[in-house]
Amino acid sequence: MLALLVAEGLLKAWAVTALEPGVKHPLIPGVLHLGFTLNPGMAWGLLGGFAAPLAALRVLVGLGLVGAIGLGRVPRRWVWPLALIAAGALGNGLDGLMRGAVVDYLTSPLLDAVSKAVSNQPFPIFNLSDVLVCGGTGALFVLSWRKDRHVHPRGEPQP
């Protein structure tokens, strides 16, 4: 988790110095590009006027998850997904507290096409922290809906 948090901090520091708003650099043409924006809110700029409370909430969620994992309060199979969510929450939370906005640096023309078909808006620019939160959430969803899980008498799913 710490390695992911450090990697995200380094990527954001690089993005601030190397990328310009409005200029896209293809990494995987048509799929993943580099871009740049400072986002004081959430996806699609929602809650842009609440940068500090959003940052504080993200940090609190990240620290709460780290504490729960560290104290062994979560089922073992949920540790990695929750660690991904914690790293993402802390990455964007600390960024928001230090900069007053979150550095976003990834765009996806593929996701833009899907988003425009559904909402007439491009998919928001994002960062590794967002990917970690979404990946961890997706993993939790899959783990919680596995058909082959067994329930312990105390109600805790067994690996």
Image (tube, grey):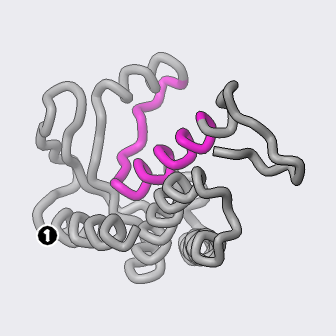
In this rendering, is residue 16 above or below 75?
below
Residue 2 belongs to the span the image colors magenta: no
Tell me where residue 118 appears, x and y as whole percent.
Answer: 53, 20
Residue found at x 67% / y 62%: 74
Question: Which residue matches tag 1?
Answer: 17
| Number of other residues with Cα within 10 Å of mark 1, as a class: few under 14, some 14 to 19, many 20 or more | few
Residue found at x 58% / y 67%: 49
Does 83 sit left or right of 53 as displayed? left
Nearer the observer, 13 or 117 = 13
The answer to which image quadrant residue 2 occupies is bottom left
In this rendering, is residue 67 above or below 117?
below
In this rendering, is residue 139 above or below 87?
above
Kind of residue indicated by mark 1: Thr
Residue found at x 33% / y 64%: 4
In this rendering, is residue 21 above or below 61?
above
Tell me where residue 116 appears, x and y as whole percent.
Answer: 44, 23
Tell me where residue 93 appears, x and y as whole percent.
Answer: 49, 72
Residue positioned most to the top: 117
Q: Dividing the image into 4 quarters, which one contains the N terminus? A: bottom left
The segment highlighted magenta reads 119-142
The dominant secondary structure in magenta is helix
Label tally: 1
Does 144 sit left or right of 1 as displayed? right
- Please tell me whether mark 1 sits on a helix, a strand or a loop: helix
Q: Dividing the image into 4 quarters, which one contains the C terminus? A: top right
Residue positioned most to the bottom: 98
Residue found at x 88% / y 48%: 153
